[in-house]
Image (cartoon, coloured by chain):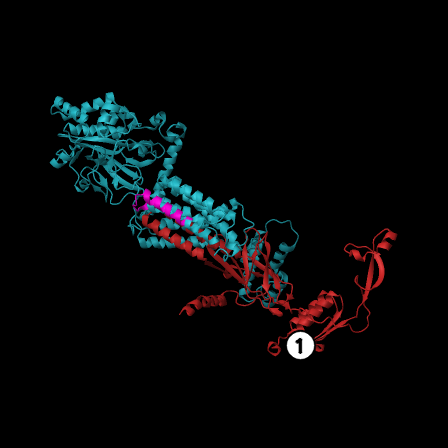
Amino acid sequence: MAEAMPAKSLLDPRSRGWVLAAAGACLLPLLLQLPPRLDVGIATAAVAIGGLSWRRPLPGWLRLLLGAALVGAVLATSGFAFGRDTGCALLAAMLAIKPAETFSLRDGRSLLGFALFAPFATFLLDQGPLSLVLGLVATTLALAALLRLSELESGDGRHPLPAWRRYASVWRLIAIGLPLALAAFWLFPRIATPLWGVPERAMARPGLSDRMSPGAWIDLLNDDSTALRVQFFGATPPTSQMYWRGPVLWNFDGRTWTQSDWMRGLPPARVRSRPIAWDYELEVEPTDRRQLVSLDLPTAAPDGIQLSLDYGLYAPKPLSALTRWRMQSAPPRSFEPELKHTLRQLALQLPSGFNPRTLALAQQWRREAGNDDTAIAQRALRMIRSDFAYTLATPLLGRNSVDEFLFDYRAGYCEHFSSAFVVLMRAAGIPARVVTGYVGGYRNPIGGYWQVRRSDAHAWAEVWLAGRGWVRFDPTAAVAPERIYDTLGDRASAGDGLFGALPGLVPMRNAGDWLRRGWNDLVLGFDATRQQRLLQSLGVPEISSGRLVALFILTASLALLWMIWLTARAEREHDVLLRAWHRLGVRYARIGLGRDPHEPAGPWAARVLAARPQSSALTALSARFAEWRYAHHDGGRPPRDLVRDLQSHRP
Amino acid sequence: MSATSAMSPRRLRTRFESWARPRQPETLPVRIDRRRVYVLPTRFGLFFALLLAAMGLGALNYNNNPALLLVLLLVGAANASLLVAHLQLTGLQIGAIGAEPVPAGSVMSLRVHARAAPGRNRRGLRVRCGDADAVLSLEEGTGQAVLALPTLQRGWLELSRLRISTTRPLGLAVAWAYVWPDAPLLVYPAPEAHGPPLPQGIGDASVARLHPAGDDVHHLRAYRRGDPRRAIAWKPSARRDSLLVREYEQPLGADVLLDWHQLPGIGHEARIRRLARWVDEAERQSRRYRLELPGQPPLGPASGAQHRHACLRALALLPRLEQVDG
């Protein structure tokens, strides 16, 4: 096989280096999106295979073995569930193995072709700025490697271009293609309803979910990326009232709180709102889950969103891309004042045989307080405020997690506090449930919008009190309000996060997030609906798809014409005078008196004069032309009037 | 069935080639304008297009804008690469082609000279003629490619069209143009390998040639670089205190007559090959020779490169009589 291959189609080491570097650059952003361990594994495999097969191909059985091992590792990590991320991880694994058989020009090209799938796959998983920048860099490198390969193919491989020239060429190509690309991006008709669904992630990313086990949110609470951006129209609530309600958890098995799925289908409970109403637009970063959050209780669900009994908002599809929702919310005056018996049972249920000390304490409080539910809840808050501390460094809890927390450690974070509080309430016979979501927010001074980070994730309690219905109690806020209703100043002094410790970077962060929001607005959030309203500012309310196609064809043809103009322009004579002279010759050629290539100006003019004695202007023109062209003069631009006369002369 | 399907691409190709410009030989110089540059995707280009189509469909379906933007940037760059490939050839001027005549059967080096306005990078253009190909790289506006053409028979070598092509910059598309130079190339007859020596000269032995391997010592002269050591006359050198060299003289017959009619009994082509060898041999011995061919005025007597070319050209252009020759 190898002997039959002509020598010229083999990659030389430098070209091979270019190809592998480009493939590595393509792989990098994808690896960053894969679960840890898996990405390290694939990266190690890629480097090892690249190194091992540098001099000679790996034997076939070894390649097969490596491939099977990587695919097996990917499938095992994802628990043999096939999702979008599993597919992407498989692609990464394939790319890691491919260098083992990349030796000819053709192999190199097919590797680069497949490698370009990697940034594409990255964007399916994440659309953040880092992925975008890395994807762009990878694309540039891949195209530069293609450039290098075709240099090799043309037999000019011994005089390679310097690397910067190659990047410059790639960017020139992209720049020439840019008008066409942008026309297609804005105007090519978008698909309003997908032909096939977005496969979900098989491996969930950390975030708010339908379950919560105390101690499990450490990753989430340290994740400083933005979860929501909120633009308020009109009144803005104080940060201490910014409770972004998410999943409501009813069921407790001693360790984990979970949602009741059947409750989604029930109609929303009866709510009497206070007269305050907040009008806002949520920009939700992709979560890959169906549930949305809302500020306190929404007065109505947005279009296409289902509102459940406990005021959870459910989208019809997992939110795998950036979405925007316009909503109104109001704090409740009363929230489900009549609790149905089954729901009451559910809100009182505790697993039997867990947390005996907590149960005993609750029963003791009940005996002391009589029928006053509010007093019990206040007493619990008082206890927590006086004896408990907030910390993210918590020990692993054992079987009686609430007992250990309430009586032994007495320190923890929102998960522990809310869980213990609800268990205590239920044990005292008060219906209670855990609510998760985000709390607080940070106002971006540049954009005038509010940012809610994933680290603002929070869990609190709702307690059902007669007459008022579900009332929010936040035991964590009783301990460490500054840790919850955060401002960036608190963060900076507490040294949270990577950037929080450096106050000088705060303006940069603000500007960065503002830019990101602009990018989201302009590019990421662009879809079929926005496309229809594209020309709204020009007074066209809605573009029909037929018009859109016409507009696209028009702009695309303009872009193509521009390209053709570039081709034609490259050929044309640079000297203005000569160009005018040649055009003159073309005009005479139409009447059969064209200048022959060997014919000087004077004899040609004489010949034309002989054929058409009535026109003598050409003789004078050609004399002037010849004088300027061949007489001695010190460079400079040709006289403008001569050029103009040549241009305007007609036979 | 399979025969026709195997034929059809070739038929398509011949049809294209009969349609493609230029359709007849043209005088050089030829400037390649945009109307005669053809661009088609390569196999890799088609694969790339398929890849982009798949990515584009996915991006549109998921309404994933960064992915769509990536695909569109790649589409734009690929499209621009067609243009750049086109631009590599347009404006190129094939100034001249030339080749030294060589005996049939040996390889003729065909030089193709190209010019273009400097400023655009035109490197690694591929020039192909039949099965021979070479790389043409323009440095500061000029460049030359040397094609090794096989020669089969004496006479005029009719060039097929030169195909100038490039797959740069990305290898996605091949741009090519044809140039059909109206400049036939001469191929000398192949001299026979072995045969009788030159016929003796005719007329007076008026020319004697100095030859270091001759018999009669003619005179002594000063040593010149390159003289064989055994030609040095050591004793006279010792006397004169400088190196002297003996020169010998060999009497040679005067003009050699290479007459077609004096070679009966061998075939037509064999005669031509023998005469070709004799021309070369006479030239090597610096003898004047006259070539007489049927139906032509005699050439010479003379010697020198020009005379040799005239003789070999006349021999090369003798009509071919393959059937008679058998």
* Position of residue B32 measured from the top left corner of the image (x, y, whole percent): 54, 60
Can you name the residue that lies furthest to the right here? B239
Q: Is residue A110 visible?
A: yes
Colour seen for chain B: red
* Position of residue A365 measured from the top left corner of the image (x, y, whole percent): 15, 23
Q: Residue at x 39, y 41 (%)?
A: A41
Residue B236: quarter of image: bottom right
Q: Which residues are magenta?
A: A62-84
Residue B233: quarter of image: bottom right
Q: Is residue A382 left or right of residue A593?
A: left
Is residue A64 shown in magenta?
yes
Colour seen for chain A: cyan
Instruction: Please tell me which residue lies in front, A579 or A639.
Output: A579
Q: Chain of mark 1?
A: B
**What is the quadrant of the C terminus of chain A in the image?**
bottom right
Q: Is residue B65 visible?
A: no
Vertically, is B162 above or below A229? below
